[in-house]
Image (tube, helix red, strand yellow):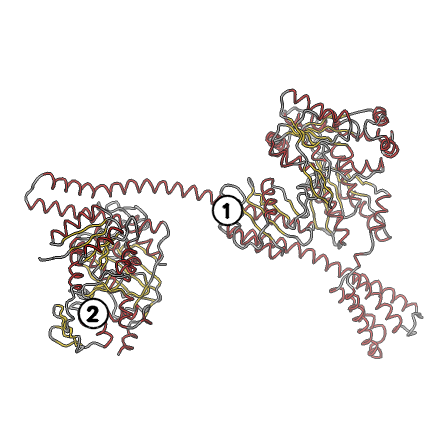
Amino acid sequence: MGPDDSRPNPDELLASLLNEEEKSKRGKLKIFFGMCAGVGKTYTMLKAAHTEKEKSCDIIIGYVETHKRIETAGLVKGFEVIPRKTYDYKSTAVQEMDLDAIISRKPQIVLVDELAHTNAPGSRHAKRYQDVLEILDNGINVYTTLNVQHLESRSETVAQITGIIVRETLPDEIFENADEVEVVDLTPDELLHRLSEGKVYTPERSREAIENFFRKGNITALREMALRIVADRVDKQLHDYMQHKRIRGPWKSGLHLLVAIDYHHHSTKLLRWAKNLSYSMGADIQAIYIETLHKLTPREREQLDKNFNLAKQLGIKFRIITNYDIVKAIVDFAQKENVTHIIVGKPRVRNMLSMFRLGNFVKRLIRYSGNIDVYILGSDSQAKDYFKKRVSIPSYTSNIRQYVTVSFFVILSAIICHILEDYIGYQVVSFVLLFLVSILALFFGTGPILLAATLSALIWDYFFIPPQNTLHIEKPLDLLMLIMFFIIALLNGILTSRIRRQEKKIRIREERTQALYQLARELTMASGIDEVSKIAVRYIQKYFNSDYSIILKNDLNQLDNQVPNDVKIKLTENELSIAAWVYKNSVKAGKNTDTLPSTDYTFYPLTGNKDNMGVLAIKHPHPFTQGEEQFWEAFLSQISGKFEREFLRNAARKAYILNESDKLYKTLFNSISHELRIPVATIMGASDTLLSQSYPEETKLKLYSEINTASVRLNRLIENLLNMSRLESGRITPHPDWCDVHDLANKVADNLKQELLPFEFSTVIPANMPLVFIDFGLIEQVLHNLVLNTTQNAPTGTNIRLKFFYDSGSLTIQLMDRGKGFPPSELTLVFNKFYRGKDAKTGGTGLGLSIVKGFTEAHGGTVIAENRQNGGAIFTIKIPVKISDMNQFIRHDE
Amino acid sequence: MTNTGNILIIDDEVQIRRLLEITLSANGYKISEASTGKEGLAAAATGQPVLIVLDLGLPDTDGLDILKKLRDWYQKPIIILSVRNSEEDIIKALDNGANDYLTKPFRTGELLARIRVAIRQSQGIPDQPILEFGSLTIDLPNHSVHKNNEIIKLTSTEFSLLALLAKNEGRVLTHQYILKEVWGMGYIEQTQYLRVFVAQLRKKIEDDPAKPKLLTTESGIGYRFGS
């Protein structure tokens, strides 16, 4: 161990800090831990609870089993007890702890007996420890009890010692992460004494128990195990403490275990053993499975999944690596991950070939592993029996049709060869058959190829090798050839089909990698939550092909039952409540999980970096295989990440809009208050003057005229504001009708004739101008504002020209003047709301042109402002329109 | 000016009523007022006005309903004076029997002109066979039109269109109404016909077809004829 190892590893420090932070929000878990039943765990727990209660702590009983022990039952008195919930299971009522009642009661501490208990079907979680975790998540402290045999990593050893298989187990992680563990210890003699006194069980049961389980040897072994676990725990706590306080010390860390598992039951033992080892060594641990060419039978696959689940339960992270060479894969991985110890199972010998191969395996592993320690764990006889019972030859079970097909081909070729035998001789026949077997290997599995090889060898021998029609072979050379023929056919066939399998495996992986890559790309380009859901839906349909539902959160961070588009199924009330639970707890639930498994769907949380984005429910026809699960999880994490980004973007956009609308409000306020007050002031002032005194007729007329001008200006402003608000509210929908642009030009010129008086205004319309299909009123308003704007900005006397023409699907309207034009910097800004040119005359609000833009766009058109080459400004409006040729109607009439 | 007869103003805004009262009285009309639809209906029944100026946004009933109720028995002109300025509202009012429509804010001069035209039309001027508009003469029985004493050749459709417009001088006729009258019910949506023939007609009868004075366009609503 180098000097660096004595320093706290930053990662570990961070992990311990995070752990601390995580823990402070959660409730604390205290476990009363004993070697077996009857040591008084529940009793001790209740005692401790009484002590807390005296300190006026809000402590209640969630679930306590007194087993009719009088001392214990006495202690229950004085506590509030949450009534149990009744489940109907196979027409018997089963009572379980009422999880929701506890959470909504929210005490400081709740007592929950028997942590390893398995809940009745229909409960939310399969196991009570999951209930406890949920209680802890809700910030409630829990006191609970646990026996050593219920720890996953010890259950096997306990079974070996006592001969009783323990079914109710819980992951070691729960125990390891408990905040406090109190050992409830009793010497074996005391325990036996208590038993015989009937303090634990009724007298008959006591006798039975003493004979079966509570033998002194057993109890001693269990006691030692329990005390050792707690000692290890104390050791680890000390280590954590020193790490946390940055105390220099003999750090044990820096040890990394790697356990290589396979698809045999033996691996479970390997995992448990490795876990115990890591525990006592203070090392971290991971597991690895090397996917090879071996085609898994359904049973092997099932066992492999079990092994993976066990690893998960033991808190061992695992990886799957595909490589035809197991040794190389293990060693490569170990070197990459700085593994210090490799743990493998002792290879099992099933036949000559495997003995040769596996012996080699150990040798090679030791040779290549260099300075990495290698542990080889023996397999016990029980495990062997297990295999004898379970291992059949299922890998050769290709279906019947394949066997029939290969037989057919072999026989057919044999017949052809028989016909041709006179020309080619019997030796060439062997090549033909060999060739056939190789070809067949490309299409069929190992079993059929084995048959093809055997069948063709027999046929060759029987029908072709002299003497014919007998299996007897005369010439030694022929015998040799037959043996070689058989071996070559077999090897050839098996190798080919093996390559094919590998190819298939690689292809599936490749396909998945490709799919994920494709998904990532599509997601990068997608924008908007709807689009992301669409992509997710497409991938689910393509790669998982099952019923699904995506439920996303709303702005209030609640699951929104109003599901978005493209959702195939509607969930029931019950399913939605599961979805809500999954969303809240970030844990998958539903079918094939430990939580609420009695539903058709599996619910996965869409977990982003910080929050859950929603829930994805999917109906699997069968449980995921390991490869599929990995693919699915990668898929989910990509989708969730993207959803999160989209949600964040929405939030950012909302904040931006809020900010913008605030700005807009201020601008509006400044601009409008000014624009409204000026004409009102004029009207008030002028009329006031007229009312107060009598003036000469001439003065009066001037004042009247001022009032008139002011009111026109006011009216225009109001008109613009109303139009603007129509635009903003999205209420503008054009109602197009056939329109003669002459009318349009005319109307605009007529309405603005006062304003246009000081200018030379002209309209240009080509003679063959067709009728256009537009909303007359909207476009009139557009042109009105545009022309008015020009009259306000162009110098008096300039030429203003309004030009219409139609070209390839679009109506173009241009308004040009010979004024100063725009400063180049303003060209893109003129259409902005409330934007006013620097040199603009007073009297405008900066609304006119933005309405021009809004109305034009409502019509599907565009408007741009430019400077003309020889001076002046030009506005160009382009609107896609339908047209109608005017002349056809005239001809029709005449 | 001898404008006899009583004009009923149905409008809930005092200021508007006052303005109208001042303006119309100054032009020799007698005025009666109503501030709600109900009052308006009663006043119309008792006062026998020669013309009604009706607001659409009344506090008790929608002006459009009042218009319909009035039209059940009231034959004289009704002019709508409203802040509602959408083409849809205007067309609906005209289709339900309003003679004319003005949006607030309005120019009093314009209102007076519309009132004059409406009253003149309603005074049952016997059908004249020959109509004259400045230099334009329309001889209805003979289907002939003269401009500056020169005959103008019109197609039969053009003539029907011109005759319809001329007979309703000063009144806005909606697109649908014109299409129905000239082309028939089946053509009610065929506004392109109307556009084409109006353009043709303008070329023949207007002094400057680019700036029509006789046949004017009411944006999105219809046409009005008159000098």
| Distance between the alpha carbons at the discs numbered 1 and 2 | 59 Å
What's the chain of the residue with tag 1?
A
Is A117 positioned to the left or the right of A655 in the image? right
Instruction: Using the rendered view, name the quadrant where residue A235 is placed.
Output: top right
Q: Which sits in the foreground, A752 or A106?
A: A106
Answer few, some or many: residues within 10 Å of disc 1's Cα (few below 14, many 20 plus, some between 14 and 19): some
The location of residue A273, given as percent across then percent down, is 78, 37
What's the chain of the residue with tag 2?
B
Query: Is residue A661 something that shows in the picture?
Result: yes
The location of residue B157, given as percent across then percent down, is 25, 75
Q: Residue at x 40, y 43 (%)?
A: A657
Answer few, some or many: residues within 10 Å of disc 2's Cα (few below 14, many 20 plus, some between 14 and 19): many
The location of residue A519, given as percent across then percent down, is 57, 53
**Which element type, helix, strand or loop, lies under badge 2?**
helix
The extreme top residue here reads A54
Question: Relative to residue A540, is residue A18 depicted above or below?
Answer: above
Question: Relative to residue A35, is residue B143 depicted above or below?
Answer: below
Is B184 positioned to the left or the right of A239 in the image? left
* Front disc: 1 or 2: 2
Residue type, mark 2 in image: Arg
Q: Which sits in the foreground, B134 or A747?
A: B134
The mark found on residue B202 in the picture is 2
Q: Which residue is mark 1?
A: A646
Q: Residue at x 85, y 74 (%)?
A: A426
Question: Relative to residue A676, is residue A496 depicted above or below?
Answer: below
